[in-house]
């Protein structure tokens, strides 16, 4: 049996007629930038995230970057980020002109360890950028206490967590602002790049709205040195169609994850840990093994796709060699990078496919 790591076809086949109709509708209007579709999606997604404002932009990276800029974070400032995350989290800080300060994750949850945050705070620290990695909410209550104590902004990186909840509150509404990615493989994905900032802060929303459009709220009147980072009408239209199905798709992922957790029984494989009061959306189902290379090879031979998220921690990437980190500086992130492996989890996986993955993993020695 062949099971790809990801397969978007079942999802897209199910909504094909709606997506085609939406494309024809936008094509006929001949209005492709910052029109009704973007406005409609921004309203729908802000409602979904239970916030007052949503501002569509070009990508998830842009969303985080613009949120920082919108909060006037820049040169000379420091922003705390997890040492275990995709590089976009740190790049957003760098693009704003600030310095990313890495804090190790909890080895069980893979998310930033609240116990270690205070030691990283200096007089230059302006914000905490919290990542809900793999669709698992971070420990927001503890993080909020620290932020309040030191008067820090909280920016949520929700790129992998559309619809996840912490204590019945949806991510994207838990901090000062949040950045979402709509990359095609996300739980809510466009058919190209896209992103959004969500917030309850009117001033932040207004500034991000200008920054995404050359720093302008009124054509040819530029308040800031802005950027060209606009969610286009076609992607906004597609996202509006998909948003209606997001709850259903997330529930499907949860059912797969529940089957994996209940039935995978192998001492050489460590399953994900979910914190109390969290409702993950399982963008990724990440297991851990000290024999990861052998495990991935075994799965490949059995026709099962897998991926490594992420093989090289940010502090060891060439892009950040100017920070002068070396191997061993962030041992938890390094350990995770050597042991994690993401298994197939996508809408439309059949029971026999899920059972095959479980059976193959249980037989691995």
Image: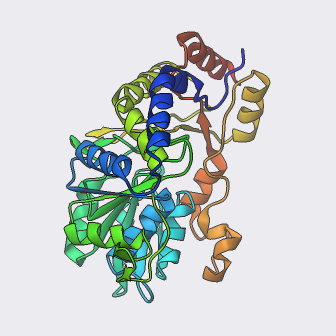
234 horizontally vs 47: left or right? right
Q: Is residue 345 above or below residue 202?
A: above
The answer to which of 209 and 115 lies nearer the viewer is 209
Q: Is residue 307 visible?
A: yes
268 horizontally vs 90: left or right? right
Q: What percent of the width, then of the height, locates residue 73?
A: 37, 80
The residue positioned 72% from the left and 27% from the top of the image is 299
Residue that protrudes farthest toward the top in the picture: 352
Quadrant location, the C terminus = top right
The residue positioned 59% from the left and 71% from the top of the image is 329
The answer to which of 203 and 298 lies nearer the viewer is 203
The color scheme shown is rainbow
Q: Is residue 84 above or below residue 325?
A: above
The answer to which of 329 and 91 lies nearer the viewer is 91
Q: What percent of the width, then of the height, locates residue 99?
A: 49, 80
Quadrant location, the N terminus = top right
The residue positioned 46% from the left and 29% from the top of the image is 21
């Amino acid at each position: 049996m062949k099971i790809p790591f990801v397969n978007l076809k079942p999802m897209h086949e199910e909504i094909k007629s709606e997506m085609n109709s939406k494309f024809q509708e936008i094509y006929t209007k001949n209005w492709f930038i910052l029109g009704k579709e973007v406005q409609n999606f921004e309203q729908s997604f802000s409602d979904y995230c239970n916030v007052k404002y949503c501002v569509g932009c070009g990508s998830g990276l842009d969303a985080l970057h613009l949120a920082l800029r919108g909060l006037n974070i820049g040169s000379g400032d420091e922003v705390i980020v997890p040492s275990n995350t995709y590089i976009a989290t740190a790049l957003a800080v760098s693009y704003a002109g600030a310095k990313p300060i890495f804090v190790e994750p909890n080895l069980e949850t893979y998310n930033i360890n609240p116990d270690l945050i205070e030691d990283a705070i200096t007089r230059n620290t302006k914000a905490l950028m919290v990542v809900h990695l793999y669709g698992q909410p971070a420990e927001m209550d503890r993080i909020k206490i620290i932020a309040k104590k030191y008067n820090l902004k909280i920016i949520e990186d929700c790129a992998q967590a559309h619809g996840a909840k912490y204590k019945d509150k949806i991510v994207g509404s838990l901090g000062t602002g949040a950045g979402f990615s709509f990359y095609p493989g996300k739980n809510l994905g466009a058919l190209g790049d896209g992103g959004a900032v969500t917030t309850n802060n009117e001033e932040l929303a207004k500034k991000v709205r200008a920054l995404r459009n050359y720093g302008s709220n009124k054509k040819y009147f530029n308040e800031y040195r802005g950027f060209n980072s606009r969610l286009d009408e076609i992607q906004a239209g597609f996202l509006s169609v998909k948003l209606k199905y997001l709850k259903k798709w997330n529930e499907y992922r949860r059912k797969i994850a529940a089957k994996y957790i209940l039935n995978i029984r192998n001492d050489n494989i460590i399953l994900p840990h979910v914190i109390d009061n969290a409702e993950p959306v399982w963008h990724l189902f990440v297991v851990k093994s000290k024999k990861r290379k052998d495990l991935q090879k075994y799965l490949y031979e059995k026709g099962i796709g897998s991926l490594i998220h992420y093989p090289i921690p940010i502090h060891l990437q060439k892009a950040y060699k100017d920070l002068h980190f070396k191997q061993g500086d962030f041992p938890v992130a390094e350990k995770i990078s050597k042991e994690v492996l993401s298994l197939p989890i996508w809408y439309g996986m059949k029971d026999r496919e899920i059972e095959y993955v479980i059976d193959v993993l249980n037989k691995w020695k």
